[in-house]
Image (tube, rainbow, N blue to C red):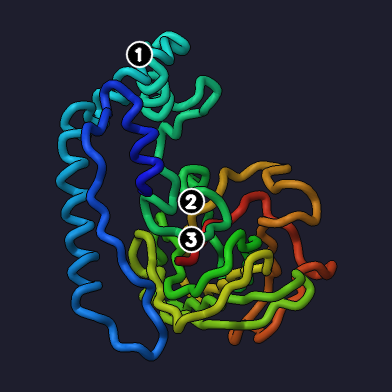
Amino acid sequence: MGLARLQQVGHDPDLELTTTLAIKPMEYAVRDRIAKSTEYNNVVDNVRDLDARLGPVTAAAPANARLSALEANQGTRGTNGTIYAEIDALKASPPADAVPNTCADDTALYGDTIASRPRSECWWAEPVSNGYLTIAATRSTKTFTATDLRFCIPAAAAGSGTFDLKLYTGTTLANLTERATVSGASWVASAGVKHAGLSNISITKGSYVAVGFLCTGFTTSPKFSSTAVGTGAQILISETPYSVWKSGQALPLPGSLNITDSSWTRSNQQFWFALA
């Protein structure tokens, strides 16, 4: 703050300066010339003098008092008092047309990054018979690295059999490529949500993601979580997510898939799986 500015402020009755600042004249610094200690001392003296003279000014009219006067002059806005109270009220409450989130989603509750369907919609337990290669497909809404594959067995298999599952991805449903394999009857030998570790598989937003699973040899087929069975239970024709199947199949599962060709039959339910 220069001397002229301080003198202008001094005309305010609340901030009046009764004395003239004793500014000590100083020389400009010159490049390559050694600074004089007297010049440094003048800087220190001037700062201390200014600080000492501004002390009574701030004490006579503190900032809080000035702000309070400004707030009072602003008057009221809306129904919450002063303008500052109105701002605080707006920050504390959502807009009237905001829809509150009354329940946590599957990502918040379980850590599912993407899923074929919400868990709450897949309360049905659908048996998958021996030799029925079943594919469940969806599209990824995010780009992320998948480290966990999840599926659910509501009712376990009985007898001695085999179970194989493969994870596929691709830019179209006509060209899905194998990315990971999960094998072993133990996966379907007990009920529950299953977690299969993945080796950092990159998933791109908008890409198609599918799982294919096949059971053979069980006396009682395992059941998989899905939407309720019913004609037309799938969403729009040719849209994902959806499930398809093909009977009379044997291991191993194919390394690539085209699930748009006529050899597949659309299921009457959508099977659940998730990646995280």
Left or right of 265, for residue 52: left
Return the x and y of residue 98 as percentages of the image width and height. 52, 27
Amino acid at circle 2: Ala
Using the image as rendered, state which of residue 108 and residue 47 is in the foreground.
Answer: 47
Using the image as rendered, state which of residue 75 and residue 122 is in the foreground.
Answer: 75
Label 2 packing within 10 angstroms: few (<14), some (14-19), many (20+): some
Give the label, 1 or 2, closer to the camera: 1
Looking at the image, which residue is at 79% across and 73% down?
A: 174
Circle 2 is placed at which residue position? 125
Looking at the image, which residue is at 45% across and 77% down?
A: 161
Count numbered badges in the picture: 3
Above or below, 3 against 215 in this view is: above
Element assignment for label 1: helix
Q: Earlier in the sequence, mark 1 or mark 2?
A: 1
Q: Earlier in the sequence, mark 3 or mark 1?
A: 1
Picture quarter containing residue 66?
A: top left
Circle 1 is placed at which residue position? 72
Above or below, 45 against 181 in this view is: above
Label 1 packing within 10 angstroms: few (<14), some (14-19), many (20+): few
Amino acid at circle 3: Thr
Circle 3 is placed at which residue position? 113
Return the x and y of residue 227 as percentages of the image width and height. 56, 47
Label 3 packing within 10 angstroms: few (<14), some (14-19), many (20+): some
Distance of label 2 from label 3 (alpha carbons): 23 Å
Return the x and y of residue 218 as percentages of the image width and height. 46, 72
Element assignment for label 3: loop
Distance of label 1 from label 2 (alpha carbons): 67 Å
Above or below, 161 against 141 in this view is: below
Q: Earlier in the sequence, mark 2 or mark 3?
A: 3
